[in-house]
Image (spheres, helix red, strand yellow):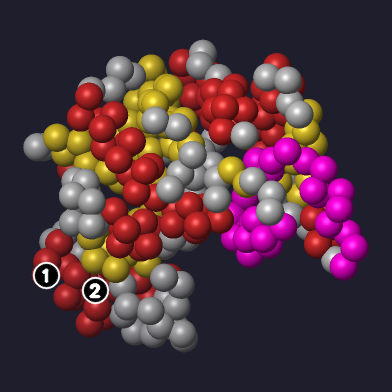
Amino acid sequence: MKAYLITNHYLVSEKFNTLNTLLIESAQKCGIELEPKTNAEMLSYLTVGGSEEIKGVDFILFWDKDITLCRMLEGLGIKVFNSSQAIAACDNKGLTHAILNRTGIKMPKTIIAPLSFNQEDMTDVVKSAAEKLGFPLIIKESYGSFGYQVFRAHDLYDAVEIANAISPSPMIFQEYISESYGRDVRLNVVGDKVVAAMERYNENDFRANVTNGGKMKPYSPTKEECDIALKACRALGLDFAGVDLLFGKDGPLLCEVNSNAHVKNILDCTGINVAEEIFEYIKGKL
């Protein structure tokens, strides 16, 4: 069985190289020849007469967020994991919330900022959000990873300054869950199973992300936590994902869903190779 691993041409670092190596070696253990290709390298395959070689692969593992490329590949009749629709739904935090808001899944109270096309003064929008959500106020860019684009505003001046700096990029406002300061749970879902889980914690930052200095330890999720993760993945159309949950005072709350979570961290933490789980799942789907 042969497949392509699609990654981003411009994300080159030890962190991403280690992840790519893990995916390729895990695929090999599962009897799959996984050939790495960047989204830039794929351009030549999409020209007239250049798509025949692509049709020789059994599937594509799309470990990027280049939605347009993903949709073009799907248009050639190739099975892509995850799908372009699922990746797009996870990549935009506002869209994720809009989809999951219809499911009854418990989430922090959230307000999606109105779309703007130029940098705007967000004072009125921030005031309206703060009246409903209070302070501290969490402000997130709709597109972002590893917690880098997540901010905590302590007062109106702080919130306006953050929102104005983000504008015109899309953003959301969320209530601050104090019980989950520096703590969250990552559940890795493959198909209809939670295959691994870890708790992330950071004593020096409200964000628990390992990239921001957080630490991790194995975690045994409750049935409620597993149910939330599985329901979210089904609603978003995901084959696999990393689902982040917060510790709310009345139970777990869904924070966000990652269509291509960094599975190396959870391997180091738990000893469970989620990548192998993903490839075995894909083999069963083809």
Q: Quadrant of the C terminus?
A: top right
**Front-lying residue, 50 or 228:** 50
Q: Is residue 21 left or right of residue 141?
A: right
Q: Residue at x 32, y 78 (%)?
A: 114
Residue at the spot of label 1: 131
171 or 105: nearer the eye? 105
Q: Specify whether residue 221 is in view.
A: yes
Is 56 part of what is drawn in magenta? Answer: yes
> Callout 1, which amino acid?
Glu
Let me know if residue 149 appears in the view: no
State the SS at label 2: helix
Q: Measured from the top left, where is residue 193 in percent x and y?
A: 39, 26
Name the residue beneath numbered marker 2: 126
Identify the image quadrant of the N terminus.
Answer: top right
The structure residue drawn at horizontal position 33% and vertical position 36%, both measured from the top left corner, is 230
Q: Nearer the viewer, residue 70 or 268?
A: 70
